[in-house]
């Protein structure tokens, strides 16, 4: 029996990349998954590859009505909502002095407001199911000041703070809220450099390599599962020790 046997999980940004790996790992652990994305063709393909345990729903996470439809899809297809993974996000780097306010607003709209809507919309269904687990993807940029990450860092610090408040408020309904803060992870849009440069880049990191997407998914599975039933309101950094000093 898998760690998520019988659970129904919503995963945003699940059409490709890390989100698609999260969806696959959840299904492998016995979950039924609603994966959402703006990319319809890729999303439908990803869901089809996972079989009857997955369904795709097109979604703009900044639109409340899309969230209503996604939650309804989970309830209609699987009868309950036990987990939410707020994975979808946008990213770019830009020095504060050359960043535009409109670009900052866009970053906050997607990364923060999208996460905010998601948490609000799943709570009634989770309460009906007796509780649940919400995992919000942040970043090590949400734990410290990284140059040229003004907009992105602001959004991920906000996700971190919002998640802590949600954990404090939702705990009365047995709903847990945690954040994951990845460092450099291979194969993600936020970390694409030649492998030949790894040795120099990671020379001062305790684990002298980038992380694998499957390692992030492993942490995610734990936080969604009943094995973490007494864990809420915390930041879970997965960065090979990059931020220990």
Image (cartoon, helix red, strand yellow):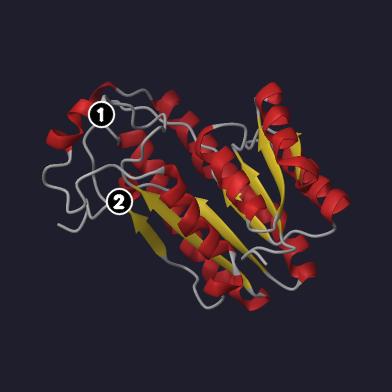
Q: Nearer the viewer, residue 223 or 69?
A: 223
Query: Farthest residue toward the front?
Result: 1
Looking at marks 1 and 2 on the same chain, the residue that comes earlier in the sequence is marked by 1
Asked if residue 42 lies left or right of residue 93, the reply is right
The label on residue 146 is none
| The quadrant where residue 146 appears | top left
Mark 1 and mark 2: Cα distance apart in space: 17 Å
Q: Horizontal and vertical percent for residue 165?
A: 50, 64
Q: Quadrant of the C terminus?
A: bottom left
Q: Residues within 10 Å of mark 2 (few under 14, many from 20)?
A: many
Q: Secondary structure at mark 1?
A: helix
Asked if residue 47 lies left or right of residue 69, the reply is left
Q: Which residue matches tag 1?
A: 195
| The quadrant where residue 63 appears | top right
Q: Which residue matches tag 2?
A: 239
Q: Horizontal and vertical percent for residue 186?
A: 36, 36
């Amino acid at each position: 029996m898998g760690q998520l046997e019988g659970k129904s999980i919503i995963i945003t940004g699940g059409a490709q990349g890390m989100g698609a790996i999260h969806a696959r790992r959840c299904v492998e652990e016995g979950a039924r998954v609603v994966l959402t994305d703006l990319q319809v063709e890729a999303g439908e393909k990803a869901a089809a590859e996972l079989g009857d345990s997955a369904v795709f729903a097109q979604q703009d996470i900044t639109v409340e009505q899309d969230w209503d439809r996604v939650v309804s899809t989970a309830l209609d297809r699987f009868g309950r909502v036990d987990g939410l993974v707020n994975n979808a996000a946008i990213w770019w780097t830009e020095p504060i002095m050359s960043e535009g306010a409109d670009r900052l607003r866009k970053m906050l709209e997607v990364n923060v407001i999208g996460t905010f809507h998601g948490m609000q919309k799943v709570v009634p269904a989770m309460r009906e199911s007796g509780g649940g687990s919400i995992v919000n993807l942040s970043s090590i940029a949400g734990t410290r000041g990284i140059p040229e990450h003004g907009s992105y860092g602001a959004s991920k610090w906000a996700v971190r703070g919002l998640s802590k408040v949600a954990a404090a408020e939702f705990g009365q309904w047995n709903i847990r809220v945690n954040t994951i803060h990845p460092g450099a992870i291979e194969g993600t849009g936020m970390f694409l450099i030649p492998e030949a440069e790894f040795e120099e880049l990671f020379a001062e990191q305790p684990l002298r390599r980038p992380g694998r997407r499957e390692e992030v998914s492993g942490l995610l599975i734990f936080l969604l599962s009943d094995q973490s039933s007494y864990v809420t309101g915390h930041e879970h950094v997965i960065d090979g020790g990059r931020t220990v000093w």
